[in-house]
Amino acid sequence: MVWRSVAPVWPDGLDGVQFWLGHNRFFGLCPVGDGITYGFGNVACARVQDPVAGRRRRLVEQFTGFGAPVQEYLAGVRCDGDIHCAPVEWLPEIAWGSGRVVLIGDAAHAMSPMMGQGGCMATEDACVLAEELGRGSDLPAALAAFVERRQQRVNWVREQSQALTELVDLPAQVRDRALRERGTSAFHDRYQPLTARP
């Protein structure tokens, strides 16, 4: 489950995306500009319905033991209604479309948000589709070329997102050791291929 929100606060020392890891949970903070921060608290648990009333209090309780930046952020969330709570879901298979209909973005290949690439993949889909459609008047060929260009990259991002999900779900001792030993290089390796043109 994930609780997402934005707050008019910029915790001290936050200069980019940061994660705080705990047992079966993590909290991420991302500055988005103008003194506003995006926060997301993930908990590995069964699907729950978290009513809006009291949601802020329950979120704070879920992450009580987390560090000062998380506490500062949570204190800046104004009200229950500012927090969105939902399960992390994704489509197990890719559905590119049929005939003259093509799907892009999450409609085609919803994935775990662990890499933060859902919107990026949708934007890339739109650009590649426009390029292929602009090459000529053969619609079936353009749609087939679009799928061929996108499939490998989208599959790779989905696999990497799943691998990150599995990493976070590892026992804290194993996960933390792996991150200490190889976290920075793994992060670079995971995102570097995305700098290539889609």
Image: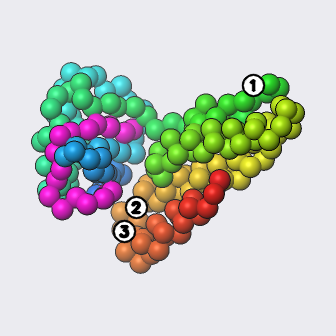
Give the numbered dot on residue 171.
2
Residue 93 found in image quarter: top right
- Name the residue type under label 3: Asp
Q: How many marks?
A: 3
Are dots 1 and 2 in contact, CB under 8 Å?
A: no
Residue corresponding to mark 3: 176
Residue 173 found in image quarter: bottom left
The relative height of residue 99 versus residue 5 in the rendered view (above or below) is above
Q: Tell whether 49 sits left or right of 103.
A: left
Mark 1 or mark 2, earlier in chain: 1
Are dots 3 and 2 in contact, CB under 8 Å?
A: no
Mark pair 1, 2: CA separation:
44 Å
Mark 3 or mark 2, earlier in chain: 2
- Name the residue type under label 2: Pro
Element type at mark 1: strand
The relative height of residue 187 versus residue 169 in the rendered view (above or below) is below
Mark 1 vs mark 2, foreground winner is 1
Instruction: Please tell me which residue is depicted at 34% across the width and 31% down the height of the picture.
Output: 85
Q: Which residues are magenta?
A: 1-19
Give the numbered dot on residue 101.
1
- Dot 2: within a 10 Å radius of its alpha carbon, few (fewer than 14), some, or many (20 or more) residues? few
- Dot 1: within a 10 Å radius of its alpha carbon, few (fewer than 14), some, or many (20 or more) residues? few
Are dots 3 and 1 in contact, CB under 8 Å?
A: no
Residue 180: x percent and y percent?
37, 74
